[in-house]
Image (spheres, rainbow, N blue to C red):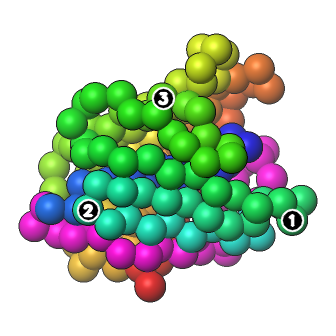
Amino acid sequence: MALLLMLCASLLHADDKVSWAGTWKLNLEKSDFGKDPKPKEIIVKIDDTKYSVTGTNDKGQPINVEWEGAADRKPRKETGPQGGMSVTLKEINDHVVEGTKISADGKQTETWTSTLSKDGKVMTEKWRIKGPKGESKLRLLYDKQ
């Protein structure tokens, strides 16, 4: 579940000079999941300010979460079967967005930085997750499809 929420980090501003919009596939071989289980597949779709994450977790269960909103520092609520966290995004520059996710009960906090490569073909996310199961760090790489 934590991985699903992390992947929503792809929620980026699509109207910058560099386009974050499109379909992104998680590169499982180049990503580092730390102590968290590796999913089978993750696809992130960014369309203007609508973001969706779909895929399959390590147990074969579906992943499905989405939200709408810009990188304007205003909290947004996730929707979908695994949704429910509050998401806040902050644009640092055309190539970097920072995000924070907080569970409804406040017991889990996730922070991340998403960086878009200069050619716009690779998105790298660095995550730090703190919750009831302890702390973990991840490095996720997505290839634009």
Question: What is the chief secondary structure element of the magenta stretch?
Answer: loop
Q: Earlier in the sequence, mark 1 or mark 3?
A: 1
Farthest-out residue, left: 17
Q: Position of residue 69 (x, y in %)?
A: 30, 44
Residue position for label 3: 86
Q: Position of residue 111 (x, y in %)?
A: 48, 33
Farthest-out residue, top: 106
Residue 128 numbered tag: none
The region drawn magenta spans 16-38
Please indicate whether residue 133 sits to the left or right of residue 95 in the image: right
Q: Earlier in the sequence, mark 2 or mark 1?
A: 2
Decide: is 32 above or below 129.
Answer: below
Q: Residue at x 21, y 36 (%)?
A: 72
Please indicate whether residue 108 sits to the left or right of residue 44 in the image: right
Label 1 with label 3: CB-CB less than 8 Å: no
Q: Position of residue 52 (x, y in %)?
A: 49, 59
Q: Nearer the viewer, residue 84 or 43?
A: 84
Locate residue 107: give its quadrant: top right
Looking at the rendered structure, the kind of residue marked 3 is Ser
Residue 60 numbered tag: 1
